[in-house]
Image (spheres, grey):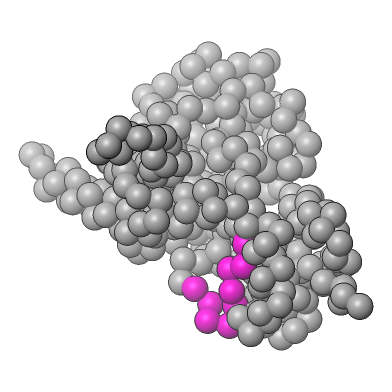
Amino acid sequence: MKKTLRIGTRGSALAMAQSTWVAEQLERAGYATQLVTVTTPGDRSMAPIAEIGVGVFTSALREALAAGEVDVAVHSYKDLPTEPDPRLSLAAVPVREDPRDALAARDGLTLGELPPGSVVGTGSPRRASQLKALGLGLEVRSIRGNVDTRLRKVTDGELDAVVLARAGLARVGRLEVITETLDPLQMLPAPAQGALAVECRVDDVDTEHLLQSVLDDEASRAAVAAERAMLAALEAGCSAPVGALAEVVEDLDEEGRVAQRLSVRGVVATDDDQLVRASVTGETTAAEQLGRDLAAELLEARAALLSGPGQ
């Protein structure tokens, strides 16, 4: 008889939606599941993420997994520290949701329609620096809280708009609040935004194979690997002002045949919110190296900008 897979999850609406989706895929493949809620330090604090630290939403889940209290842990991939945990295996990266950021503004307004001086809320330094760089005269205010708390600040008139991950809104069934999905040319998402990371213990080979066969998506894994390698090479935590987006695209090889390639774009902000951008394209099998190459280009361009005239 197959064992029941205990799936560790945070208790937030978004985390529960993500873990329930994973459970449904496994049950559809014939495996029994049970959701186990684990409280994390990030759920108990309203301090900015930059203050409470990288991994604040994932550490308790990982400890429960390593201790054998659960068999599987489901994370928002972008919340994971870039340093791997040797006790655990990243068994699956499921098909990624739309990774773009989304605006939820009063009166159905788009970003370009918000009058100068409008107050836009975000808890992300990455979003804040890119919003300021657009030169729209917006006031960016730091906020924390779950999706409903953030949206309520707009309906209550405390803010004119908030910027959220479109994937999170999709997973909790709130796409109707979006007034504009932001083009990556305006705002590159966080590395791994919209992707899930499904982990098991490194010595639990049966569960690893099961998760991989039922849930893993090769293109999503390659894209996210490139973005995360860029982030790791920049030696930045998940709250740093860094954006990245990798996409599998069709290209022509030397013989004129259609081939799958990986296109990776990155952005990093300086302390005074100037943006440095770069992009690379290469083989999908070289995802991590592409990410490191992109980081090197960004660091070089950032150094040139900071050492330029007037610096």
Question: Residue extending furthest left?
Answer: 309
Residue 301, percent across and down?
Answer: 19, 46
Q: Image quarter for residue 43?
A: bottom right
Residue 163 visible within the image: no
| Image quadrant in which you'd find residue 291 | bottom left
Q: At x 10% / y 42%, what residue is drawn? A: 308
Residue at the right extreme, as displayed: 1
* Residue closer to the observer: 94 or 79: 94
Q: Quadrant of the C terminus?
A: top left
Q: Is residue 239 left or right of residue 107?
A: left
Magenta region: which residues? Answer: 84-92
Could you say where residue 265 lies in the image, as x and y percent from the top left? 36, 41
* Depicted 247 relative to depicted 201: above or below: above
Left or right of residue 39: residue 163: left
Asked if one can make out residue 102 in the rendered structure from this viewpoint, the answer is yes
Q: Determine if the magenta segment contains residue 90.
A: yes
The part of the image, by quadrant, that contains residue 57 is bottom right
User: Residue drawn at (68%, 15%), measured in percent from left and top?
Assistant: 107
**Nearer to me, 27 or 121:** 27
Residue 104 in magenta stretch:
no
Indicate the quadrant containing the N terminus: top left, top right, bottom left or bottom right.
Answer: bottom right
Q: Position of residue 20 (x, y in %)?
A: 81, 54
182 over 77 or under it: above or below: above
Q: Residue 85 in the image: state x and y as whole percent.
A: 53, 77
At a point 35% along the width and 35% down the height, the residue shown is 257
Q: How many marks?
A: 0
Q: Residue placed at 32% from the left, 59% from the top?
A: 289
